[in-house]
Structure formats: structure tokens, C-alpha cells
Image (cartoon, grey):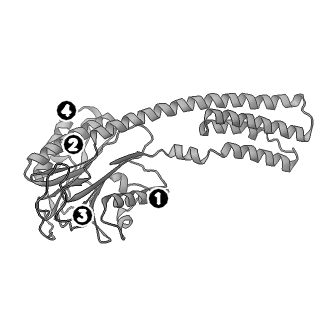
Amino acid sequence: MRMVRRDPTQERRRKLRWLPAAIIAGAFVIDIVTRGEVNTFPALSAAAVVAAPLLSLPGTIITGVAANLVGLGLVYLEREPNRDDVAPFTSLVVLTVIAAFLNVILTRDRRQLATSREVAAAVQRAVLPDPPRRVGRLTVASRYEVAHKEAAIGGDLFSIHHTAYGIRMVIADVRGKGLESIRTVNALIGSFHEASHHQPDLPGVVRQLEERMQGIIEEATGAEAETFATAVFAELPPDYSELRIANRGHDAPLLVHDGKVVPLEPSTPSLPLGLGPLGTDDFPVDRFDLPEGGTLVLFTDGIDEARDANGAFFEPVPALSGDLPPDPEVILDTLLAAVFRHTGGTLQDDAAVFAVTLGADRPAPDTDGHRPAPARAPRPARGA
């Protein structure tokens, strides 16, 4: 898994780092063209202030000194300096000093925020470790894109396990952020690990996580007591004969194969985890075919709810339609590149994406040393 914190503010700072120099150059050109009839000292004074949030401390000071030298040069080009020039040059010096202090304060705040981000990212990685690259016949890839520059810990999770009952995986999105959500994420990941290895069928896995979510809600207070989690559970039996999916109010996963993308929509809508008492106690499972070379793509709503400047939502199906290799890494890179083109480089919400590609019949042993049983030819099937 590659976890990325994109900082649009830092990117904008890099793009605008030439603005102070452009202001000084513009003031110089205007003064020369108008032969001193336009007072350009306000622009020169602004250059150092503009430099404070964009440049380093030496860069800010150099900008202020350059503004003073350019102003002095312009005066000498027109006439001899006199007492009337003391006030504007004093203003330039004072504003340069103020800009330097602002730069120091802003730099300190950025460092504190960067430290907070690093701590949050370390906590997130500890709770959500990298999945293995290979699990049975599956090649696995994952990404976690963090939207906000603040050091908030997200509530997205995913996990995959090779068990005696087959390969089981989950992706989920817990309502909220911060410590409350990370406690819920940790509890659900642990519960999924236990259920995957002990529950003989997929409805049993879902039921155990529903019960765990209900326990979290009963023990919680405040906003945490109103939490829930959307989730998709997927299972491949030991013979890889079919793909079983239980969707609890989550975005439908996508099947990418031979240039086509098919959303695997649930036949029966279900409530998210934690809202079970409001609906039925059934845990419907849909069955699909996962052909060799097919890729299952699971994602949280940070992907399909990503908006462009006009408020239009991102559509993942067109982004993955076309000639793509059966490689989950390439498919996720393609998907995320399309998302960031759509949004202009930022996300409105955290996004977790998880993909698995079914390989050949005789894979190398997975990370646990297991070698799965030979697979039958997959058969198309769907139903609750």
C-alpha cells in the first residue's frame, strides 16, 4: 500500500514562488515606462510581504533588500534623493522586517503541522498495514490517498486473508475521522481477521462484524455512539470457482477484464454495519464469475464522490475502460490518475482503493507458504 498525503497548499506555494520577483520587475518596468509619474513604492513594499508565505527566511530578506535597491536605483535614475524619500524607504525596511517575522511564524507552524501529519500517517500504517503482494492465485495492490492537509486520521480500511475456507477480503468506510474512527477501524480489522479464519461461510463473517459494530456502538458515547460503516465483503473459495460478495451499503466493486468494466451491484440492498437492528437479519450474498486475468477493484466513496470544479462527480467505469494489462498496480495507478485529473489534483475525502487480479492455475506459494488447490473453470453465476 502506498499512502500519500497530497498538500495542495505546498504545490501552490511552489507555483507562486516567482511572484515576489515578478512584482519587483513589474514595478521597475512601470516606473521606467511612465518616467516616474506612477508611484511604484507600494508595489515594491508589497513584494517582501508576498514573499513571507512563499519563500524561505533568506528568500524573504533578499526580496526586501532587492525591493529597496530597485527603489533606490529608480530614484537615482530620475533625480537626487532628498528628505521626501526617507518615508518610503523606511516603510520598505519596516515591511521587510515584518515579513521576516511572519515567515518565521509560518515556518514554525508548517513544521508543527508536518510533524502531526507524520504521526497520523504512522498510526494509520500501524492500524492498516500493507497487504501481501501475492495471496494464492491473486496479485494484490492497494492505495490510501489522504485528502485533507490537516492531521486527521481517516476511517477507511481494507484487509485480505488466505484461510481454510478460501480467500476473504473486505473494504469499509467508517463514519467520521480522528481517534474515534481509528478505534472502530482497529476493532473491525481484528474482528475480520478472527471471523475469516473461524466462520465457515461469508454470511457468518458479515454477521460477526455486524455484532462487533453493535458492541462498539453500545459501549460508545457522544458522536461515536452514532457511527456506522459501509463495507463490501468478498470471498473466493479454495477452487476459485466463483466470486461471492456481500455488500453492506457500500459502493459496488468493479470487475475489469478484457477492456470492459462491470459494476458488481448487489441484488438486494443492505444497510451499513451498525444499522442492522433497523433492517433485516439476513446477510445476502451475490455470486459472480471472476475470470482468469480479471481484476476486482474495491474503493471507498472518496473515489466516486470526488468532484471537479463544476461539482460533477467522478465516474470510475469510463476511467478503467480500455486496453489495460491484468495488473492491479497499473489499474489502480490509472484510476487514481484519472481521479486527480478530474479534481485538479485534490480530493474532498480520503480514498482507499484495493484491487486483486486472478492469475494462472499454478501460482507460486503465497506469503504464508500455502499453495491453493487447482481451480476449476469459472462459471457465471449470480444470486442471493
Q: Residue 19: x percent and y percent?
A: 66, 45
Q: Residue 118: x percent and y percent?
A: 40, 36
On the image, which quarter does residue 24 sit in?
A: top right
Instruction: Please state if 87 lies on the left or on the right of 263 as rendered.
Output: right
What is the three-letter code of the residue carrying label 2? Answer: Ile
Which residue is at 38% across, 64% downward?
A: 319
Disc 4 or 2, which lies upstream in sequence? 2
Whole-number angstrom distance, CA of label 1 to CA of label 3: 25 Å
Which residue is at 92% across, 38% downward?
A: 79
Any part of residue 282 in sight: no
Q: Nearer the viewer, mark 3 or mark 2?
A: 2
Disc 1 or 3, which lies upstream in sequence? 3
Instruction: Please state if 339 lies on the left or on the right of 381 as rendered.
Output: right
Q: Answer yes or no: do the residues labelled 3 and 2 have beta carbons within 8 Å? A: no
Circle 4 is placed at which residue position?
219
Whole-number angstrom distance, CA of label 4 to CA of label 2: 18 Å
Circle 3 is placed at which residue position?
264
Q: Residue 259: x percent and y percent?
A: 32, 71
Disc 4 or 1, which lies upstream in sequence? 4
On the image, which quarter does residue 255 sit in?
A: bottom left
Any part of residue 154 in sight: yes
Q: Secondary structure at mark 1?
A: helix
Circle 1 is placed at which residue position?
341
What is the three-letter code of the residue carrying label 3? Answer: Leu
Q: Secondary structure at mark 2?
A: helix
Disc 3 or 2, which lies upstream in sequence? 2
Q: Residue 215: x percent and y percent?
A: 16, 37
What is the three-letter code of the residue carrying label 4? Answer: Glu
